[in-house]
Image (tube, rainbow, N blue to C red):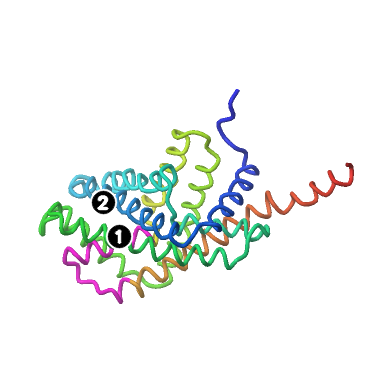
């Protein structure tokens, strides 16, 4: 019978293997796939705005759930279609800890992909704003402006904490999707965790690369300085802590650190 899911220890190994492949990507590949990831996340974000635009007047809880339910399509596209997402790539530290590649390879990927994600997100936000689908005064435009305004109104500390909590869940979604052996499994692995982080109100740096510029293009009283200092920088710091430190370190201790003695023992018996 075909195996439909990997064990957690097998997922850890597969994550290291995936990190090796990401470390070997050329700059051009990272730029192209990074731009695509920014666009994919933006598609999910736009779907969330569209479905949530008029539900606030009916029920706030229902609006939040509908918004959160549509957003995960972005990660599904990244995982299944293939793209490079900064927050998901934070898991690369697991392979680095296990000496599969250098930390300089990780930084090379993160920096290139982060910028590419930003380009894809901002370009899509501009195109959507100029498409006529979100005319001034419409519920969708008002919601987008409200989201952007609220995101730059957060204090630095809470933004970092929300970023940490967000990317713990995001990389766990990627972890689960890595363990799934078919498309349906990967879809469910993406949908439930990502829905949860959006519903909970946590902060995702790449999603905010779309939400904030979109609101700005539609008339939100937000400057680029506010976007970076009040949101993107603290949220990115939080995402890095949650995605590149918390989850990889815990799973390294749980599944990878004990692997070496077992392998050594087998070698001695041989």
Image quarter in which the C terminus is found: top right
Q: Position of residue 56 (x, y in %)?
A: 21, 49
Q: Residues within 10 Å of mark 2 (few under 14, many from 20)?
A: many
**Image quadrant assignment for residue 211:** bottom left
Residue 81: which disc? none
In the displayed structure, would residue 183 be above or below residue 105? Answer: above
**Image quadrant assignment for residue 117:** bottom left
Q: How many marks?
A: 2
Boundaries of the magenta span? 206-227
Residue 45 magenta-highlighted: no
In the displayed structure, would residue 110 be above or below residue 9? Answer: below
Residue 225 magenta-highlighted: yes
Residue 210: which disc? 1
**Image quadrant assignment for residue 158:** bottom left
User: Residue 64 or 235: which is nearer the viewer?
Assistant: 235
Q: In whole angstroms, how far apart are the C-alphas of marks 1 and 2?
A: 9 Å
Left or right: where does residue 203 sit relative to residue 11? left
Judging by the rendered image, the residue that carries numbered circle 2 is 46
User: Residue 124 or 158: which is nearer the viewer?
Assistant: 124
Name the residue rendered at 79%, 47% in the picture: 263
């Amino acid at each position: 019978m075909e195996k439909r899911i990997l064990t957690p220890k097998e997922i850890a190994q597969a994550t290291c293997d995936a990190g090796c492949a990401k470390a070997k990507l050329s700059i051009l590949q990272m730029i192209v796939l990074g731009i695509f990831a920014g666009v994919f996340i933006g598609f999910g974000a736009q779907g969330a705005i569209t479905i949530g635009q008029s539900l606030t007047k009916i029920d706030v809880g229902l609006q939040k759930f509908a918004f959160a339910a549509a957003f995960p399509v972005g990660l599904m596209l990244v995982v299944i279609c293939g793209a490079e997402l900064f927050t998901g790539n934070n898991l690369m530290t697991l392979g680095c800890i296990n000496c599969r590649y250098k930390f300089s390879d990780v930084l090379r990927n993160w920096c290139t992909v982060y910028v590419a994600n930003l380009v894809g997100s901002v370009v899509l936000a501009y195109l959507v704003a100029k498409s006529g689908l979100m005319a001034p005064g419409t519920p969708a435009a008002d919601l987008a402006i409200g989201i952007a305004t609220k995101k730059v109104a957060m204090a630095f500390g809470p933004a970092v904490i929300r970023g940490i909590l967000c990317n713990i869940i995001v990389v766990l979604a990627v972890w689960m999707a890595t363990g799934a052996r078919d498309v349906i499994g990967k879809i469910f692995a993406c949908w439930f965790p990502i829905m949860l982080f959006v519903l909970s109100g946590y902060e995702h740096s790449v999603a905010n690369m779309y939400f904030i510029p979109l609101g700005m293009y539609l008339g939100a009283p937000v400057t680029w300085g506010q976007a970076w200092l009040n949101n993107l920088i603290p949220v990115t710091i939080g995402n890095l802590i949650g995605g590149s430190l918390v989850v990889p370190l815990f799973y390294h201790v749980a599944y990878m650190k004990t692997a070496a003695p077992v392998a050594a023992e087998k070698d001695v018996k041989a």
